[in-house]
Amino acid sequence: MDKKNNFKAVCFGEVLWDVFPSHKKIGGAPLNVALRMNSLGVNTTIISRIGKDEDGDDIVSFLKDQKVSSDSIQVGEDYKTGVVNVMINEKGNASYDIMYPSSWDKITLTQEMIEKVSESDVFIFGSLICRDEVSRSTLFALLDKAKYKVMDANLRAPYYTTEVLIELMSKADFIKLNDEELKKISIELKSPYNSFEQNMKFIAEKTNTKQICVTKGEFGAVLYYNDKFYYNSGYFIKVVDTVGAGDSFLATLIVRLLKGKSPQKSLNYACAVGALVAGQEGANPKFSNTEIKKYMMLEEKKSKK
């Protein structure tokens, strides 16, 4: 990344272990986003909290290996490092059982955090971190200091309320949803519309947000960016598991947009990365820019035949 594009990002929220039937992997949406941003050359900080236990130590070691700083991850003795039991169905889609309370529910505000967020170019957060009052109050304090706020809805019933959700969306400059979340939120906000695009515009107007992106699984995504719609209909991939695909998509999209790439090109590239992640096991497989471009070209050639 050249110097004019050398910006800083802060991801706030859960770091945890995704426990699958046969193995376990480090995860949590904010951590997945941070890892992908870091792999794209962005100076990324993750703010979270872990327990003083083996799972927590392993997360710190993993971050060091990935060259992501763990300096802003608090360590507490009162609660264990987060664990999520993940079940993958025959289509590769995931369902989650999230342990509560976990250490990441108890992130406490510090002056260092405030400074990190104030100095960053982009601040990424989700709704799951708001299930506990401690982390929620820390998030709201940091939102007041952030320059450009990106919300990944990441709805996990029963851990959100419509009231908190609307408040978070109203504070965001960019909102990322999946198609199910778009439907749920539109219903909860009493939207009079039935079409995809009308509901995106409705949410944008209701929350005073100029930029919304909705992912559609294997069928790509729709980006509403400063009053204009952009579309990508997806890239073919044999799905292995979808864990982390949306996180990598979001990280890639935001980085490309902040680098000044066009909304359409940014969306295409992000959809390709999301598809490649879904085609491999685990949330954070690595790809080079050459591999991503090659995959995009192959798929574009196939679609023209």
Image (cartoon, rainbow, N blue to C red):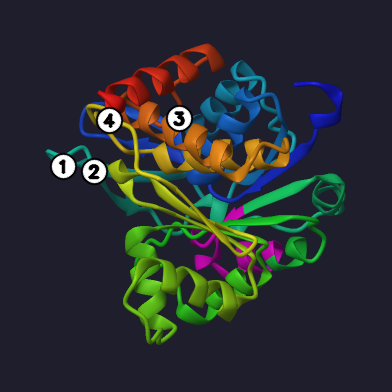
For marks 2 and 4, give the CA distance. Answer: 16 Å
Marks 2 and 3: which is nearer the front?
Answer: 3
- Badge 3 is on which residue? 273
For marks 3 and 4, give the CA distance. Answer: 12 Å
For marks 2 and 1, give the CA distance. Answer: 6 Å
Say few, some or many: other residues with alpha carbon within 10 Å of mark 1 (under 14 / 14 to 19 / 20 or more). few
For marks 2 and 3, give the CA distance. Answer: 17 Å
- Mark positioned earlier in the residue sequence (3 or 4): 4
Q: Is residue 158 visible?
A: no
- Badge 4 is on which residue? 236
Q: Secondary structure at mark 1?
A: loop
Mark 2: which amino acid? Asn
Mark 4: which amino acid? Phe
Where is residue 143 shown, x and y percent of the image? 73, 63
- Mark positioned earlier in the residue sequence (3 or 1): 1
Marks 4 and 1: which is nearer the front?
Answer: 4
Mark 3: which amino acid? Val
- Residue range in magenta is 125-139
Task: Look at the numbered discs 2 and 3 and tell me whether their residues touch, using CB distance below 8 Å.
Answer: no
Name the quadrant of the N terminus.
top right
* Relative horizontal placement of residue 239, taking residue 154 as reference (left or right): left
* Relative horizontal placement of residue 73, taking residue 155 as reference (left or right): right
The part of the image, by quadrant, that contains residue 144 is bottom right
Secondary structure, magenta segment, majority class: helix
Q: Which mark is residue 36?
A: none
Q: Secondary structure at mark 3?
A: helix
